[in-house]
Amino acid sequence: MRRYPNAEVVWCQEEPMNMGAYFHVQPRLVSCMLAEGLPLPVNGRINYAGRAPSASTATGYGAVHQQEQAALVDAALSL
């Protein structure tokens, strides 16, 4: 992380926010950033690009999945 001090850290995952590794990895990435003296995001959390929290792992509709997938990729690359 020291090589890219101005890089914006973004966690991207296909699973809904409450089912993937974000909540496990997020505090560890923050600890690494603090240890390296790197600036944290304004809210103190790593930016998240992925599906919103959900009770199910998928929508069940192909068209909705394609829309969610496109939005996920767009969010990950435009943050």
Image: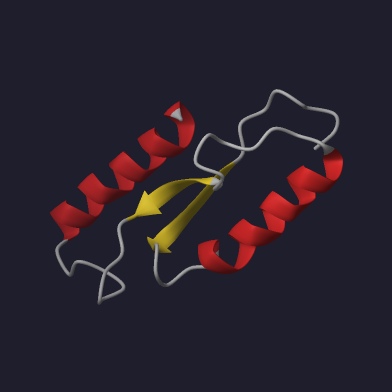
The extreme top residue here reads 6
Image position of 32 (left or right of 74): right
| Relative height, residue 17 to residue 1 (above, below) | below
Determine the residue positioned at 74% across, 54% down.
31
Determine the residue positioned at 85% across, 29% down.
3
| Relative height, residue 70 to residue 26 (above, below) | above
| Relative height, residue 72 to residue 39 (above, below) | below
Where is residue 5? Give x, y as percent: 77, 26
Where is residue 18? Give x, y as percent: 39, 69
| Relative height, residue 69 to residue 40 (above, below) | below
Where is residue 77? Give x, y as percent: 47, 31
Report the coloring of the rendering.
secondary structure
Image position of 8 (left or right of 57): right
Q: Quadrant of the N terminus?
A: top right
Image position of 55 (left or right of 77): left
Determine the residue positioned at 64% across, 38% down.
40
- The mark total stands at 0
Image position of 66 (left or right of 77): left
Determine the residue positioned at 31% across, 73% down.
57
**The image quarter in which residue 62 lies:** bottom left
